[in-house]
Image: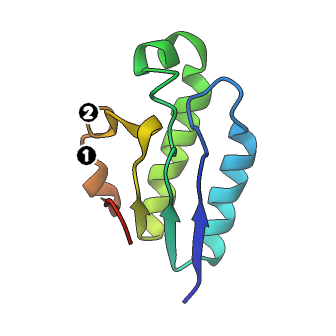
Amino acid sequence: MKIYCASDLHIGYEHASHDKILSFFDIVEEQADKLILCGDVFDLWRYPYDKILNTVKPDFENVMSHLKQTAAEVPTIIIPRNHDYNLMTLWKDYKDYNVSLTDSI
């Protein structure tokens, strides 16, 4: 079993490497059996959703769509941390995409 892990993606932050994140998700879809995202997957602390909408909305929506596609193919676990607060409000249907949230592995 191949497990891919990543942390501190900070999706939604204006200086996040959204293109590299998309490339990582492509690799995960091709090669991984499971994906674990270890905290600060999003950057809802510095960039609450309303700020994302006013600054990086196209990048955010593109990465979010790709994350959903990846998670639908590869079981995904997210371990939320401080920058992921309010995640369940932003992504209410995360379970529909084969994603589980946990405090630890």
Q: CA distance from mark 1 to mark 2?
A: 9 Å
Q: Is residue 102 left or right of residue 72?
A: left
Give the residue displayed 49% in from the left and 66% down from the top: 36
Residue furthest bottom in the image: 1
Q: Nearer the viewer, residue 26 or 49?
A: 49
Q: Is residue 59 left or right of residue 89?
A: right
Pinpoint residue 11: horizontal percent, then vertical percent. 57, 37
State which quadrant residue 97 falls in: bottom left
Q: Is residue 4 left or right of residue 91?
A: right
Give the residue displayed 51% in from the left and 44% down from the top: 40
In the rendered image, which residue does mark 2 sit on? 89
Pinpoint residue 99: horizontal percent, then vertical percent. 35, 60
Q: Is residue 27 left or right of residue 7?
A: right
Give the residue displayed 38% in from the left and 72% down from the top: 105
Pinpoint residue 23: horizontal percent, then vertical percent. 72, 54
> On screen, 1 above or below 97?
below
Pinpoint residue 61: horizontal percent, then vertical percent. 52, 32
> On screen, 98 above or below 93?
below
Residue furthest top in the image: 54
Label 1 secondary element: loop
For label 1, the crowd category at 10 Å Cα-Cα, with few meaning under 14, some 14 to 19 and many 20 or more, is few
> On screen, 12 above or below 10?
above
> On screen, 75 above or below 100?
below
Count of picture labels = 2
Q: Amino acid at mark 1?
A: Asp
Q: Amino acid at mark 2?
A: Thr
Asked if disc 1 and disc 2 are in contact, CB closer than 8 Å, the reply is: no
Q: Nearer the viewer, residue 84 or 11?
A: 84
Q: Nearer the viewer, residue 104 or 78?
A: 104
In the rendered image, which residue does mark 1 sit on? 93
State which quadrant residue 72 falls in: bottom left
